[in-house]
């Protein structure tokens, strides 16, 4: 068996990582929503918690987007460095 055949292609690995991250985010959102909705609070408190969690999730997604953008830039710059060499 050739050594290259034993390793995943970078594109396949990136796709797998993306699916794991998306699955994690979806699980976090669903878990948070169920935790809030099933908690024995008054309606006004529940609405406040939903708004707070929504803001937290929005912030997390923004941070994640920034991280993905940085990683993509690093990959592009690394690929350019390999081509120039």
Image (spheres, grey):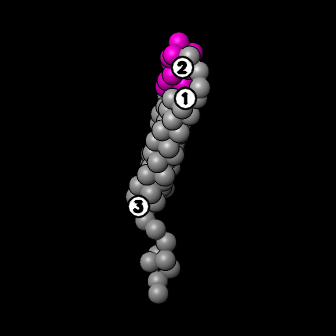
In the rendered image, residue 74, in percent from the top left (x then y), is placed at 52, 43
Callout 2 secondary element: helix
Which residue is at a point 59% across and 21% down the rendered structure image? 41
Circle 3: is it few (<14), some (14-19), or many (20+) Cα within 10 Å?
A: few
Q: Position of residue 23 (x, y in %)?
A: 46, 48
Say which of 43 and 65 sits in front.
43
Check disc 3 and report its element: helix, strand or loop.
Answer: helix
Task: Determine the residue positioned at 53% across, 12% down.
Answer: 44
Q: Tell me how far mark 2 sits from mark 1, CA to CA.
A: 7 Å
Horizontally, residue 22 falls left or right of residue 41, namely: left
Read off the magenta span: 43-60
The residue labelled by disc 1 is 36
Residues at discs 1 and 3 in contact (Cβ within 8 Å)? no
* Residue nearest the viewer, comparing 9 with 53: 53
Residue 71: give its label.
none
Q: What percent of the width, then of the height, locates residue 45?
A: 57, 15
Q: Is residue 52 visible?
A: no
Please give the residue where the numbered disc 3 appears in the rendered image: 12
Give yes or no for contact between labels 2 and 1 (Cβ–Cβ under 8 Å): yes
In the rendered structure, which disc, 1 or 3, sits on the residue that comes first in sequence?
A: 3
Question: Is 4 or 57 nearer to us in this picture?
Answer: 57
Asked if residue 15 lies in the magenta stretch, the reply is no
Question: Is residue 49 located in the magenta-colored stretch of the structure?
Answer: yes
The residue tagged 2 is 46
Q: Label 1: few (<14), some or many (≥20) within 10 Å?
A: some
CA–CA distance in space, label 3 to label 2:
41 Å
Single out the mark in the foreground, 3 or 2. Answer: 2
Nearest to the observer: residue 40 or residue 8: 40
């Amino acid at each position: 068996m050739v050594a290259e055949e034993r390793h995943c292609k970078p594109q396949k690995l990136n796709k797998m990582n993306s699916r794991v991250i998306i699955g994690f985010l979806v699980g976090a959102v669903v878990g948070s929503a169920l935790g809030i909705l099933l908690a024995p609070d008054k309606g006004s408190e529940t609405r406040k918690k939903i708004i707070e969690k929504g803001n937290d999730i929005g912030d997390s997604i923004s941070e994640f987007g920034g991280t993905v953008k940085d990683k993509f830039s690093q990959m592009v710059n690394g690929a350019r460095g390999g081509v120039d060499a």
